[in-house]
Image: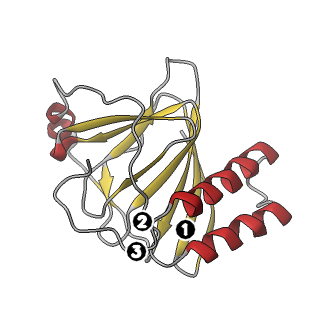
Amino acid sequence: MEMKEFYYEDGIRVSLFNLDHEAVSFHFHQSVSDMIYCSKGSINIELPELKQLYNVEHGNVFQIPPNVKHRFANGEDKGKPSQYVLLQIGIFDIEFMKNTRDLKNMLNDIKLESNASTPIYIESRKKDILALADKFACHKPEVLTTQENLDVITALRRFAEVGIETSYPICDEIA
């Protein structure tokens, strides 16, 4: 797994993840949600405490609310890479889980939901997200390849296009 962190200003954090077949560790956030755009391959999203397992295909978006333990994994066959762009709005925090065996076991017998997508809640940051896409179109972050930068721009514009301009609603489950 390769993580490229390249932007965290004014309450907006953007990162890019290239996934081989090593999953991101189980974690959760207390004050931000993870919004992902699958830019290559497909991404499996594991939500053990909700007993939910999703596959997000190329071009789809998915949001995980605060305080939900989760991890991301490559949804493709071994040897085929996947990639996603991560957007977070607010003050970044993260807590990694130490004992993950119980979390993994919670996913036993859970059916994978294919071609998943959820609403995206972007608060009142649509203009900021579009401005950031325009900024990256003019000035590529050094850590990104040209293609990765294009993927980030596409992701940000997609978040702005489909994003609902309100905070994430309080709910018991995602779907």
In the rendering, which numbered label is found on residue 121? 2
Choose the circle earlier in sequence order: 2 or 1.
Answer: 1
Q: Is residue 111 left or right of residue 23?
A: left
Query: Vertically, is 128 above or below 114?
Result: below
Compute the Cα span from label 3 to label 1: 18 Å
Between 157 and 79, the one nearer to me in the picture: 157
Choose the circle earlier in sequence order: 3 or 1.
Answer: 1
Say if mark 3 contacts mark 1, CB within 8 Å.
no
In the rendering, which numbered label is found on residue 13? 1
| Residue type at numbered disc 3 | Thr
| Residue type at numbered disc 2 | Tyr
Q: Residue at x 19, y 28 (%)?
A: 110
Compute the Cα span from label 2 to label 1: 15 Å
Compute the Cα span from label 2 to label 3: 6 Å
Label 3 element class: loop
In the rendering, which numbered label is found on residue 67? none
Say if mark 2 contacts mark 3, CB within 8 Å.
yes
| Residue type at numbered disc 1 | Arg
Q: Residues within 10 Å of mark 2 (few under 14, many from 20)?
A: many
Mark 3 vs mark 1: in front:
3
Mark 2 vs mark 1: in front:
2
Residue at the extreme bottom:
10
Between 71 and 45, the one nearer to me in the picture: 45
Q: Residues within 10 Å of mark 1 (few under 14, many from 20)?
A: some
Q: Is residue 4 left or right of residue 165?
A: right
Residue, disc 3 = 166
Q: Residue at x 48, y 65 (%)?
A: 88
Q: Residues within 10 Å of mark 3 (few under 14, many from 20)?
A: few
Between 70 and 42, the one nearer to me in the picture: 42
